Image: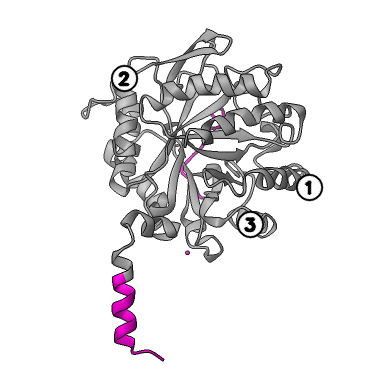
Amino acid sequence: MWKDKTLTNDKPRRRSPGRVLIGALAALALIPVAVISGASPAGAATNQFRGMNWAVLGDNFSTGPLVLSGLSQSDSNATVRAKANALYDDMAAIGVNTVRLPINTHTVGTTWWNAYRGAIDAATARGFKVILAYWEDGAASGGRITNIAAWNTMWSNVTYTYGSNTNVYFEPMNEPHGYSSSEWRTVAANWMSYHYSAVPARTLIGGTGYSQDLRDICNDSRFSGTLLSFHHYAFFYSAMTYDAFRSHIQTRLGNCASRAVVTEFGAPMSTGLNYANASSTDNFVRHIRAVTQVMRDNQMGGTYWPALGGKPTGSSGYDYYSMFALSGSGTNLNLTVRNASGRDRIRYGWGL
């Protein structure tokens, strides 16, 4: 997420034939529908992803180690696991089964990485899915990878460690807005060729721009076996009606809603907005209601931005988009929902 950027509308996959068919159909009938749909992302809904982003307080664009909100760089792996489990307990209470976590070249492979992995391992141990997404090295890098060699080394480390873990998913880059569509698709395709242990079915390729348009990615056969990462915020665009938001979102999903995960969407959760109000004239309410309706209509999953962390709003000390307020100390951490109607609407989008 990058909330300081003002965006305008983007311009930016010799037996009798009869006996063979009958045998195939009989065998197919014995396979659960969920298994069939999960075999290829190209034809599968993605609402198995019911998630939240766990972010750094101050956002994830950094030229240093990524220390998630609630963690300390002095924490051991065991401490990180204990803290993460306390937070995941509270997330799971509202239906979360997925967490999207940031990585960068200043975290992976360092001493802090040995501890940071506790957040990943705690999640997968409880059956959560984990989306690991690369954040560029600070906002000054302009939405481009500043060091391709370091980026590839980072991903080699990550995919070597988690390539065989079926609960871990890989997102080569968050919001690749510094690249043209053609450039980004080449970068992403090269990444897939290089990091072959990241199977396409567990790879999420971000849309063009701020991951806000999937159409070019969707139509590129090099990504036909992957999942797709989509972002949509009200502040990306001018104010719209609820119906206009729904149409806008659906248009930018192209023909690939069945493979898309809305890995970022969010709105203020600390200002008392009523996300249950279908007749609200508030642009944030209309937006969240529209995003979650499109998700539900298309059986799409999503990871709300953020559970905690993010860019502090004013002098509040927290991002007012954050779903939870963090309290407690040590490993005894607790999360409290900031807005019940917002929580309920997110759950509605997940299909709950």
Q: Give the x, y percent position of residue 332.
A: 52, 11
Residue in the image at 36% along x and 30% along y: 95
Q: Give the x, y percent position of residue 175.
A: 57, 41
In this picture, residue 59 sits left or right of residue 39: right
| 317 over 5 or under it: above or below | above
Is disc 3 in contact with disc 1, using a CB cutoff of under 8 Å? no
Residue 192: mark: 3
Residue type of the residue flagged with mark 1: Ala
Residue 340: mark: 2
Dot 3, crowdedness within 10 Å: few (<14), some or many (≥20)? many
Q: Give the color scheme: rainbow, by chain, secondary structure or one colour.
A: one colour
Residue that numbered label 1 is attached to:
149
Q: Quadrant of the C terminus?
A: top left
Q: Nearer the viewer, residue 172 or 311?
A: 172
In this picture, residue 71 sits left or right of residue 226: right
Residue in the image at 66% along x and 60% along y: 193
Under circle 1, the secondary element is helix
Q: Give the x, y percent position of residue 91.
A: 42, 25
Task: Find the distance from the CA under tag 1 to the CA under tag 2.
Answer: 45 Å
Q: Quadrant of the N terminus?
A: top right
Residue in the image at 33% along x and 61% along y: 31
Under circle 3, the secondary element is helix
Q: Nearer the viewer, residue 116 or 348?
A: 116
First in residue order: circle 3 vs circle 2: 3
Residue type of the residue flagged with mark 3: Met
Task: Find the distance from the CA under tag 3 to the CA under tag 1.
Answer: 15 Å
Dot 2, crowdedness within 10 Å: few (<14), some or many (≥20)? some
| 231 over 30 or under it: above or below | above
